Image (cartoon, rainbow, N blue to C red):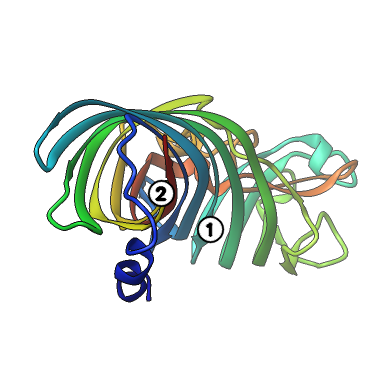
Amino acid sequence: MILLCAPAAGAQCQAPEGRYSVKANTNIGLGNTYAATSTVGGVNLDKSGSTSFGVDFRYRFWKKNDLSLGINAGVDYVVGSQTFKATDLKFDYAAGADADMDGDTYQRYSEVSDARQKVLLGDVAVPVYVDFNWQFSEHVSLYANAGVAFRFATLTKTKNVTGNCDVYGIFPKYDNLKIDDEWLNDFGDHSLAGARVENPRQTDFTMNVIGGAGLRVWICGPLSFECGVNYQYGFMNRLKSGRLANGNVTEENAPVTYTVANGRAVKSFASALSKDRLSMLSINLGFIISF
């Protein structure tokens, strides 16, 4: 619609020639926006998403005929999420006296099935990039850009958890007696919904490369519209791996634990990851005011 209306609008106003511009923009992630690698069988990143909203400032430092180069810097706020799943995750650890109604120690065996955790993410991003612009017609130009973005984490919170956990205990004190009665020590098959959930550890500062291309359409006067495709790749892990990634399960890092005093607790599944980096293909939309 903008491409069809632009010629009529251009007949009544003049195209901008200023060196400076301000752009309000959004980047909407397509598909999964994070790439993750798990070292624990049964734990994986199920899906992820990311959307940003920001304002960029551009200074055109070179122009020749229909070609120009500009330097850009801005501030974005990024909202996203990662959903982790655990399927047929089996583990055991030495449970202390605080995990038994009678104060006995035992080996606690658990199997987590069809479990999911959703982690909400928030970041403030500062993109810095150079863009190339080719004004191949009066109303439409082609652009390409490349640069880096610096990110500062503001939010990492586990929203909820679903799934089931089947638990039993082996008690050496009673000749390795197996107990799975549901009335004792949270044994048996239980839903994880409503359990206390730990938030994952985050990397406070990350950096990623950015690049993109698209079209800019002059609407009228100083106002233009931008539409294109961007790609961003992170150099650092957004969520930090934990001791579970080393493969040694203990009472401190087990995915699901229990104490008589505090009940059932679920650790972050992200602790099983060795890699969790931004890998985002997105649609870029923006309105530009030049002066």
Q: Which residue type carries mark 1?
A: Thr
| Mark 1 surroundings: few (<14), some (14-19) or many (≥20) residues within 10 A | many
For discs 1 and 2, the disc positioned in front in the rendered view: 1
The tag earlier along the polypeptide, 1 or 2, is 2
Residue 233 percent location from the top left of the image: 29, 41
Q: Which mark is residue 40?
A: 2
* 118 lies above or below 238: below
**Camera-nearest residue between 39 and 184:** 39
In this rendering, does residue 270 appear at all?
A: yes
* 45 lies above or below 93: below
Residue 205 percent location from the top left of the image: 48, 24
Q: Which residue type carries mark 2?
A: Val
Q: At 53% across and 25% down in the image, what residue appears? A: 204
Tell me the element at label 2.
loop
* 16 lies above or below 159: above
In this rendering, does residue 42 appear at all?
A: no
* 214 lies above or below 133: below
**Camera-nearest residue between 269 and 277:** 277
Tell me the element at label 1.
strand
Q: CA distance from mark 1 to mark 2?
A: 16 Å
Residue 219 percent location from the top left of the image: 38, 59
- Residue 21 relative to residue 117: left or right: left
Quadrant location of residue 114?
Answer: bottom right
| Mark 2 surroundings: few (<14), some (14-19) or many (≥20) residues within 10 A | some
Residue 164 percent location from the top left of the image: 66, 68
Q: At 74% across and 68% down in the image, what residue appears? A: 190
Residue at which label 1 appears: 83
Q: Which mark is residue 64?
A: none
Task: Please identify the quadrant where the C terminus is shown.
Answer: top left
Task: Please identify the quadrant where the N terminus is shown.
Answer: bottom left
